Amino acid sequence: MKKSKASDVAILAIFIAIMVVIQILSQIIYSVWPLPIVPTLLHIPVIIGSIVLGARKGAFLGLVMGIISLVNATIVTLPSSFLFSPLQPLPGTNHGSMWALVVAIVPRVLVGLLPAYIYKLMPRRFGAGLAAFVGTATNTILVLSFIFLFFRTVTHQTFGALLASIITGNSIAEVIIAVILTMAIVPALTKARQHA
């Protein structure tokens, strides 16, 4: 039991390290990226961790993802930074919004919860793919919906624009990458943990 707990903590630490590396590399690569599609990859370790380690640890990884997003938006000032950090002022004001914490953290915690339950219902390669699809869709739909709910007076976004932003090249690329990687990695990781 103790060995299993220590092993889970070690795997959790590895997932967090992978997330930090992905964030740093994404910043570097996307600064010179020539294509208009810029997929988010940070949610993939959260989904895989959720499936392999369970909902509680998955939710923790989701929280870490939200904190990374919050810290990044606080340090790197972009036109959209105020959506993810209350320390970035809303356009035309000198104050941020606490709703930014909800946008940055709540969807990401759910990305860490839902895949574990889906995979429990369907513990096969297809279940891993479905869990990746749901996790990715949860991130995209909730982040964009919360931005619409809490910041539409600032962004002047219509409901039609919200729907259009959910179904973009980025969203489709994120789903495809997450499903392929999750279906490839989860069976190998679960097998390795059973033999550990």
Image: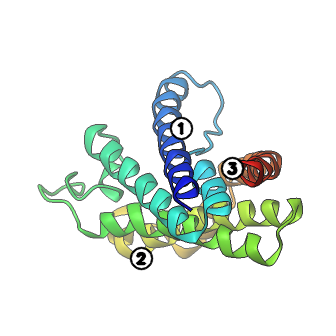
Res 54 → quadrant: bottom right
- The chosen color scheme is rainbow
| Mark 3 to mark 1 CA distance (whole Å) | 17 Å
What amino acid type is highlighted by mark number 3? Glu
Which residue position holds label 1?
Answer: 18
Q: Is residue 41 left or right of residue 82?
A: right
Quadrant containing the N terminus is bottom right
Q: Earlier in the sequence, mark 1 or mark 2?
A: 1
Q: Residues within 10 Å of mark 3 (few under 14, many from 20)?
A: many
On screen, 73 above or below 24? Answer: below
Which residue position holds label 3?
Answer: 174
Q: Is residue 159 left or right of residue 131?
A: left
Res 55 → quadrant: bottom right
Q: Which of marks 3 and 2 is nearer the N terminus?
A: 2
What amino acid type is highlighted by mark number 2? Leu
Q: Is mark 1 on a helix, strand or loop?
A: helix
| Mark 3 to mark 2 CA distance (whole Å) | 23 Å
Q: How crowded is mark 1: few (under 14 residues within 10 Å), some or many (20 or more)?
A: some
What amino acid type is highlighted by mark number 1? Ile
| Mark 1 to mark 2 CA distance (whole Å) | 32 Å
Q: Which numbered disc covers residue 75? A: none
Comparing marks 1 and 2, which lies closer to the viewer?
A: 1
Whole-percent x, y for residue 190 in the image: 75, 54
The answer to whether residue 143 shows anywhere in this view is no
Residue shown at 56%/47% (left/top)?
A: 11
Residue shown at 39%/60% (left/top)?
A: 104
Which residue position holds label 2?
Answer: 149
In this view, which residue lies farthest toward the left? 94
On screen, 12 above or below 166? Answer: above
Closer to the camera in the image, 190 or 85: 190
Comparing marks 3 and 1, which lies closer to the viewer?
A: 1
